[in-house]
Image (cartoon, rainbow, N blue to C red):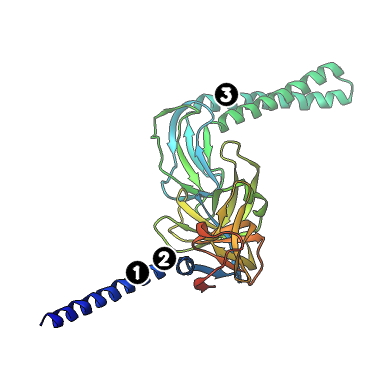
Amino acid sequence: MKKKTTIWVAAIFILLTIFFLKIGFSKSNDNDPKKDKKKGQKKVEAFIVTPTLLVDEISVSGSLQAFDEVELKNEVAGRVVKINLPEGKFVKRGTLLVKLFDDDLQSNLKKMQAQLALQQNIYNRQTELFKVNGISKNDYEQTQLQVSSLKADIEVQKTLIRKTEVQAPFDGTIGLRSISVGAIVTPSTLLATIRTDNKLKLDFFVPEKYGAEIKPGLKIKFTIANGDKQYDATVMATEKGIDNSTHNLKIRAIVNSSSKELIAGAFATIQLKLGENKNALMIPTQAIIPQEEDKKVIVAHQGKVHFVSVKTGIRKFSKIEITEGLQAGDTVVTSGLLFLKEKGKLKYSTISK
């Protein structure tokens, strides 16, 4: 009995020894530096550079304006005696809109016209006398001078009378009037506004770096607030001078589209297509490594890490244009950039285009 017990104890001891030896061997394998190095190598994502179409387009804000718009004001102070300001109605150029009191000026005009008529008769008689030497040349010239002076005074008087009238400067639509008959107005009093309603212009600003790209004749598209419908316009002119405070260039375009939704003063969003490149090299923005003096990307060269300096261009959403440093077909690393070193081996998880 004792012999069997001894055998069982010895067997258990042998089994336990084998068990612990296996555990020790397993741990030693886990601590193997070669295995750690192989297991610790991280996979990275990569992107194959492929030529693609790049449209150089920017979006800026602007506002619609009436092609012609004027605040109607009188030139002289006076009392309003007649109003012809049909609110919201179309009027032709030269239409009398507002008339001020001018009875005193009209009386003076009639007086001057009577004096001119009398002086003209005297001048006509003296002309006949002068032909037969019946009057001195000096008297004849004095009469002639008086006639000319009266004519000039009459023209001045007519000008003063015209200043009591406000006429439509162009064909347009009258806005809301601000006066009534009997009101005493001054040259600073706003009577109403008049604007063209069949022709609009679009004013907007672009950053100075795009100034050279904007030229008369450039076709643009725009939308107005709370709408997705696009309208057409054509660049008419630029300010030819950069604003010192904003460093923007003012642009003016003529609206080619017509719609009841297009109202002077409305806010607009303008899409400017400045050009396109059919062979642009675009890569994901996360592939760029900012440096103090330049920018770098990691390019796979024979399966190893290679840092390359690049120059960037236009940014579009999650991608950016590379103008120098890369070629079509290059493989660029887009993840794990901080853990890679020059000439280190690469192992990919995904490769996209």
The answer to whether residue 114 is left or right of residue 28 is right
Task: Check disc 3 and report its element: helix, strand or loop.
Answer: helix
Assess disc 2: are there few (<14), some (14-19) or many (≥20) residues with their C-alpha within 10 Å of its C-alpha.
few
Residue 20 is situated, as x and y percent measured from the top left of the image, at 29, 71
Residue type at tag 3? Asn
User: At 45% across and 34% down in the image, what residue appears?
Assistant: 190
Assess disc 3: are there few (<14), some (14-19) or many (≥20) residues with their C-alpha within 10 Å of its C-alpha.
some
Is any part of residue 28 visible from this angle? yes
Residue 28 is situated, as x and y percent measured from the top left of the image, at 40, 68
Residue 104 is situated, as x and y percent measured from the top left of the image, at 52, 24
Pair 1/3: label in front: 1
Up the image or down, 8 lies above or below 296; here it is below
Q: Which residue is mark 2?
A: 31
Given residues 186 and 165, the one toward you in this image is: 186
Residue 121 sits in quarter: top right
Q: Which residue is mark 1?
A: 24
Residue type at tag 1? Gly
User: At 89% across and 21% down in the image, what residue appears?
Assistant: 133
Up the image or down, 254 lies above or below 161; here it is below
Given residues 26 and 158, the one toward you in this image is: 26
Q: Earlier in the sequence, mark 1 or mark 2?
A: 1
Residue type at tag 2? Asn
